Each structure stands twice: as structure tokens, then as C-alpha cells.
Image (cartoon, rainbow, N blue to C red):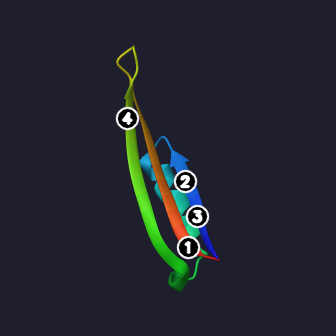
Amino acid sequence: MIKVKLFDHEHEKDLEVEMNKFLEKMDEKKLLDIKYNVAAVQEEDDEQIYCFSAMVIYKA
């Protein structure tokens, strides 16, 4: 069975920490792929908000 685990954070370091914790527990042979995305939104007050996300695709 193929499964996915989704991660979403406002800071890239938080995403990195959470993903590494998840991947430490996984057998490398079960890892199929990792998809990564960054989105940025400009607020009306000129503040820029980032969203760092990733999807781990693995065999269960």
C-alpha cells in the first residue's frame, strides 16, 4: 500500500525538523519520493507570508 505524509510550516527550519523526525523512523527502502513546495503571499501591509510544505510518499 502506498501512503503519504504531509508537512506544512511557516518556517523552513520547522519543516526540516519535523520531516527529519518522521524520516528517522522510516526504513529507507520504503521511501519512494519527496515533493517540496514554497508559496509566498504579499499582505496588504507589505508583510510577506511564506508557506513551506512537503509530501513524503512511502510504502506502508
Q: What secondary structure is marked by label 3?
A: strand
Give the Cα distance between marks 2 and 3: 10 Å
**Which residue appears at 39% of the width and 40% of the height?**
39
**Which residue appears at 40% of the width and 50% of the height?**
37
Give the Cα distance between marks 3 and 1: 6 Å
Q: Quadrant of residue 43?
A: top left
Residue underneath mark 4: 40
Q: Earlier in the sequence, mark 2 or mark 4?
A: 2
Residue underneath mark 2: 7
Name the residue at the bottom extreme.
29
Asked whether disc 3 touches disc 1, contact meaning CB atoms under 8 Å apart, the reply is yes
Give the Cα distance between marks 3 and 4: 24 Å
Residue 33 % position (x, y)? 45, 70
Residue 17 % position (x, y)? 51, 58
User: What's the amino acid at mark 2?
Assistant: Phe
Is residue 30 shown left or right of residue 36?
A: right
Name the residue at the top extreme.
45
Q: Mark 2 Cα within 10 Å, few/some/many (few <14, many 20+)?
A: some
Q: Which mark is residue 58?
A: 1
Residue underneath mark 3: 4
